[in-house]
């Protein structure tokens, strides 16, 4: 196998952890002094070293695009080479090379349109990559290079040049086009006339002069992924023009030297865009975006760190550890066997060509790229994570999703016997900064997509995510290790968008959202969204639902235990004269394959499409290949549950949910089969409630046994509190909507509480997901003699009924813990 590429090598551990005497971010003058101030060389020698640095880094940048010195005869690269060659050959055949052309491709005409020239540069980059990569049908052909040079001239003359003002989507001008253009210039630099290179770099300097500001809105500072992308663009421009100050400007942009670190990518934020200490990542001010913008930030930053390694401009900011910690804290919990969870992909869920496995593969690639230069303690753990993800995903295999450079890095890991394949991550994760909760067990994972006045229920715009109305209203994603195609296999094009699992909805008809130019978000007015985690293993979460455009109100809660999730709803009220439903499940059964039996109370149900039933008396249900569902009694239950079931075949088009200029879906019909379970609360319900239990991976017999034994008891489900108790493990979990008492546990105000008693004492976790309180007190239903360990925000009054007092003010929804005896 090929050895690791020089172009993929990152900085040494020493370079990353130690900063120079001057500062963590070397200035442009410092970059020149790196060579000139060395006592063992004169000025001419120093200048020569600097020239060598430009040449070395430009070669490295090219290798980051092509994969560098790999063996094209190696069968492990055959699929990636074929993919690149097929796409490039297609663009080559379709390229208009006529004298009077006004565009490069018929579907991207006229070339003056920002979306068209933006996408045209991307296609030219693909052609240039195939030309520069060994083993393709375009490799090294002079006619290809000549045609590329002519094509670049056309785009410059008719579309993208300094004389034009920005119009349309700013992203094409400031990130999309310049990034693809600079990459193409790197690959063609040996054949490109100096005057052409000067014209293109001048254009990029006009629209992306630095990583710090939005050119079309200079008062707007760039943050997150946009800043990282611009830093790479500026660095490539600096290398191509051999301008030390520009390269330093790019490097300093990562740390935001210009503004004193205010928007540094290597810092934690407490609001707005960036990484949060709890593992959250937010972009566009209020959108949970780990899986797209967060991944892009990771990738661009990793690329720049690797590109500038061991050079006058090496990234030496010691706070880069924030990015390293984010791999474990931010990204790993939301990647399941190589899939990126849709709850953190924002409007990207509507993109036909960027599904969960694509974004997961991209994130995995970025992690391995970063590992090439990270401290070994980090890199060793990440390589094991990546190896496990790659090996377990046989549905959408990683090698078929990535290009040659990423494949070379992955191949090195897969072929290294000293790197173990890590098992699936387990635990409970509350991302308070972005209203997301992830519960992971060995065979499955459950993700809650919540929203509040802080975090958007959805983002839509530029024709994307047209039916994302309810994706942030408590949607429950169930990831099954035996069904990795659940959300990536046509789900968003075919699922009923009014019946997303976990949501409580008013069934009113909705109009498309986000069909116009620009993007926008919807943030509801509720304060409560989030929860608490106990010992990294168990969790409770809650969300107050204040429906958009409806009078619907509800209190929703989820309790995540070892092998079950209990979902409760209370105070479900509306007065609009429409039916209100709570969706228990809407499972994608794919197409072709077995029908997958639905069993209700021990009886198999019909398996033909179009079957539906009212199952008011149902105690439990089981869907083969997914698991069980139990519908227990609970306080306040009146009459039947109103359970409904439907088996249907649904047909949709990706174009129905995404009409974006460069992301729009196809009009080809997509058909998938579904089994849907929901609870019908009737028309204009008043204080209705629900309770159901998810048993992921359980067999029919295990589901029936659980329904009989009821090892978890629902002890409250009303406007005061929602709570469950598992006597066998000594666990009591509750969310209090106001002060009250549940099962002997008393709270002085709104909060989420988990208590687990054992022979050696008890552990207590408390959070204020509404962020409305300053302090909250919890009286425990047992004697407390002392404190074994406590957060500095927690005090305990010992006694016959111990009292835990927590300073929740300013903690931004995080969990506070204490262990008592």
Image: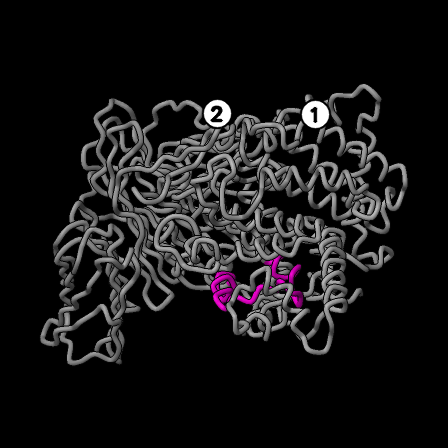
Q: Along the line of sight, which residue is nearer the eye, 763 or 703?
A: 763
Is residue 326 shown in magenta? yes
Magenta segment's dominant SS is: helix
Question: Could you tell me how far apart the alpha carbons at marks 2 and 1 are, in whole angstroms?
Answer: 28 Å
Crowdedness near tag 1: few (<14), some (14–19) or many (≥20) residues, C-alpha within 10 Å: some
* The residue stretch that appears in magenta: 302-327
Is residue 349 shown in magenta? no
Q: Name the residue beneath numbered marker 2.
A: 515
Q: Along the line of sight, which residue is nearer the eye, 322 or 524?
A: 322
Name the spot of residue 171 as percent of width and height, x first.
55, 36
Instruction: State whether residue 343 appears in this view.
Output: no
Crowdedness near tag 2: few (<14), some (14–19) or many (≥20) residues, C-alpha within 10 Å: some
Disc 1 on helix, strand or loop?
helix
Of the image marks 2 and 1, the number of the one nearer the N terminus: 1
Q: Along the line of sight, which residue is nearer the eye, 274 or 696?
A: 274
Name the spot of residue 673 as percent of width and height, x first.
54, 34
Which numbered circle lies on residue 158? 1
Extreme-top residue of the structure: 100
Disc 2 on helix, strand or loop?
loop
Left or right: 120, with 809 as reference point: right
Instruction: State whether residue 406 appears in this view.
Output: yes
Extreme-front residue of the structure: 43
Residue drawn at 65 percent across, 28 percent down: 116
Above or below 192: residue 465: above
């Amino acid at each position: 196998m090929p050895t690791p590429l020089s172009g993929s090598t990152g900085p040494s551990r020493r370079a990353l952890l130690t900063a120079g005497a001057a500062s963590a971010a070397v200035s442009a003058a410092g970059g020149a002094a790196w060579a000139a101030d060395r006592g063992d060389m004169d000025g001419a020698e120093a200048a020569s070293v600097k020239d060598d640095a430009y040449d070395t880094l430009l070669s490295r940048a090219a290798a980051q695009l092509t994969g560098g010195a790999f063996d094209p005869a190696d069968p492990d690269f055959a699929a990636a080479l074929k993919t690149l060659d097929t796409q490039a050959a297609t663009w080559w055949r379709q390229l208009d090379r006529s004298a009077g052309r006004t565009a490069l491709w018929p579907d991207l005409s006229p070339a003056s349109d920002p979306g068209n020239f933006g996408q045209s540069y991307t296609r030219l980059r693909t052609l240039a990559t195939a030309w520069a990569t060994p083993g393709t049908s375009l490799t090294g052909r002079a006619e290809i290079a000549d045609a590329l040079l002519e094509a670049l001239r056309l785009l410059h003359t008719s579309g993208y040049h300094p004389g034009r003002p920005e119009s349309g989507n700013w992203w094409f001008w400031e990130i999309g086009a310049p990034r693809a253009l600079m990459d193409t210039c790197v690959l063609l630099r040996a054949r490109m006339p100096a005057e052409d290179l000067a014209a293109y770099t001048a254009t990029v300097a006009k629209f992306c002069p630095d990583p710090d500001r939005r050119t079309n809105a200079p008062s707007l500072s760039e943050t997150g992924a946009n800043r990282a992308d611009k830093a790479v663009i500026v660095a490539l421009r600096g290398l191509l023009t051999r301008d030390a100050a520009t390269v330093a400007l790019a490097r300093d942009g990562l740390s935001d030297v210009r503004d004193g670190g205010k928007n540094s990518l290597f810092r934690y934020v407490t609001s707005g865009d960036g990484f949060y200490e709890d593992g959250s990542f937010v972009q566009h001010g209020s959108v949970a975006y780990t899986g797209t913008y967060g991944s892009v930030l990771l990738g661009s930053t990793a690329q720049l760190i690797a590109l500038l390694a061991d050079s006058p401009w090496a990234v030496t900011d010691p706070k880069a550890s924030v990015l390293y910690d984010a791999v474990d804290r931010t990204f790993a919990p939301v990647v399941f066997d190589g899939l990126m969870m849709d709850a953190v992909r924002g409007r990207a869920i509507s993109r036909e060509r960027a599904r969960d496995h694509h974004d997961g593969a991209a994130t995995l690639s970025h992690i391995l790229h970063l590992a090439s230069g990270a401290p070994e303690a980090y890199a060793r753990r990440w390589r094991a994570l990546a190896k496990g993800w790659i090996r377990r995903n046989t549905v959408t295999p990683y090698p078929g999703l990535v290009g040659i450079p990423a494949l070379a890095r992955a191949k090195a890991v897969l072929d290294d016997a000293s790197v173990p394949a890590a098992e699936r991550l387990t635990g409970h994760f509350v991302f308070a900064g972005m209203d997301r909760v992830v519960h992971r067990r060995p065979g499955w994972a459950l993700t809650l997509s919540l929203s509040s006045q802080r975090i958007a229920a959805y983002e839509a715009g530029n024709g994307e995510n047209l039916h994302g109305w309810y994706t942030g209203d408590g949607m429950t994603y169930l990831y099954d290790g035996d069904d990795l195609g659940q959300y990536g296999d046509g789900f968003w094009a075919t699922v009923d968008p009014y019946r997303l699992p976990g949501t409580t909805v008013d069934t009113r008809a909705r109009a498309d959202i986000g069909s116009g130019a620009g993007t926008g978000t919807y943030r509801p007015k509720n304060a409560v969204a989030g929860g608490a985690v106990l010992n990294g293993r168990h969790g409770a979460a809650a969300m107050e639902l204040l429906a958009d455009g409806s009078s619907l109100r509800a209190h929703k809660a989820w309790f995540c235990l070892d092998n079950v999730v209990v979902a409760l709803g209370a105070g479900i009220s509306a007065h609009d004269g429409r039916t209100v439903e709570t969706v228990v499940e809407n499972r994608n059964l794919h197409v072709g394959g077995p029908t997958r039996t639905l069993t209700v109370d021990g009886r198999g149900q019909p398996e033909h499409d179009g079957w539906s039933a009212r199952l008011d008396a149902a105690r439990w249900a089981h869907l083969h290949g997914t698991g069980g569902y139990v519908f227990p009694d609970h306080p306040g239950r009146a009459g039947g549950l109103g359970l409904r079931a439907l088996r249907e075949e649904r047909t949709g088009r990706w174009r129905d949910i995404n009409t974006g200029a460069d992301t729009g879906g196809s009009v080809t019909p997509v058909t998938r089969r579904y089994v849907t379970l929901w609870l019908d609360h009737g028309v204009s319900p008043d204080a209705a409630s629900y309770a159901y239990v998810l048993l992921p991976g359980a067999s029919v017999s295990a589901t029936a046994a659980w329904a009989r034994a009821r090892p978890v008891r629902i002890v409250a489900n009303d406007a005061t509190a929602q709570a469950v108790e598992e006597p066998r493990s000594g666990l009591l979990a509750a969310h209090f909507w106001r002060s009250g008492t549940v099962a002997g546990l008393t709270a002085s105000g709104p909060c989420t509480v988990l208590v687990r008693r054992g022979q050696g004492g008890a552990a207590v976790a408390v959070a204020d997901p509404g962020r409305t309180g300053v302090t909250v007190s919890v009286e425990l239903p047992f004697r407390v003699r002392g404190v074994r360990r406590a957060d500095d925000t927690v005090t305990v009054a010992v006694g016959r009924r111990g009292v835990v007092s927590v300073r929740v003010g300013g903690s931004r929804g995080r969990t506070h813990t204490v262990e008592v005896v």
